[in-house]
Image (cartoon, rainbow, N blue to C red):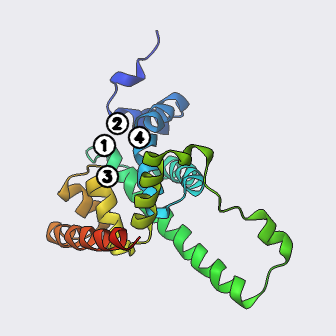
Amino acid sequence: MRLDWTTLSEGELATLSIAGRQAAFAEIMRRHRQSIFRTVRACCGDADEALDLVQETFVAAHQALPRYHGDRSMRAWLSTIAINKCRDWGRKRTVRRFLSFAIPLGMEAEAVADDRGAIDDVAGDRQELDRVTRAISRLPHNLKEPLVLRTIEGLSQAETAAVLSISEKAVETRLYRARAKLLEQLSRV
């Protein structure tokens, strides 16, 4: 008899995954990978970096699965892990920038970097999406994170507050400020 993974709750999938059923965690990933990718891409602004961070998010989630509470939203739990991975990535990027000014790299390092966009970014709609994504990624973390979780990912105000460990009123205030700052950035470009 084969299990229909799509009919199981997230708590059941977590329990089965902890018990060693790889297909259960594969179902968790299938259900949430697009949402987590959108969250991470909006936070870091780069699709390639986002793919790496999504992998790191799911690896960390798999390791932390015994700490997941079945009554909590899996999406909110994974979003918390993803936001933390993005914060770590941002800190590492800041350190790398600092060190690149302190220790000049050779020409070979510059040759590796390629800032050109993907070929599919040629279309007008795609360019506009990339422009907005970059603008969102430049927002301060305290404004970017609630905007991504609430507006892009559709988490409730309560879920967003729980993920970020802030009050619901703080979520509301930060969303207002994030939207104003985003409009300001987009109107300058």
Q: Which residue is mark 2?
A: 10
The picture places residue 57, in percent across and down from the top left corner, at 51, 53
| 30 displayed left or right of 175 | right
The picture places residue 16, in percent across and down from the top left corner, at 44, 32
Neighbor class of circle 4 (other Cα within 10 Å; few <14, some 14-19, many 20+) is some
The picture places residue 83, in percent across and down from the top left corner, at 42, 62
Q: Which residue is mark 1?
A: 70
Q: Which of the two discs, 3 and 4, sits closer to the camera?
A: 3
Neighbor class of circle 2 (other Cα within 10 Å; few <14, some 14-19, many 20+) is many
> Which kind of residue does numbered mark 4 sit on?
His
Q: Which residue is mark 4?
A: 32
Disc 4 secondary structure class: helix
**Along the polypeptide, which appears first: circle 4 or circle 1?**
4
> Which kind of residue does numbered mark 2 sit on?
Glu
The picture places residue 159, in percent across and down from the top left corner, at 24, 55
> Which kind of residue does numbered mark 1 sit on?
Gly
**Along the polypeptide, which appears first: circle 3 or circle 1?**
1
**Along the polypeptide, which appears first: circle 4 or circle 2?**
2
Disc 3/disc 1 C-alpha distance (Å): 24 Å
**Looking at the image, which residue is at 78% across and 63% down?**
112
Q: Which of the two discs, 2 and 3, sits closer to the camera?
A: 3
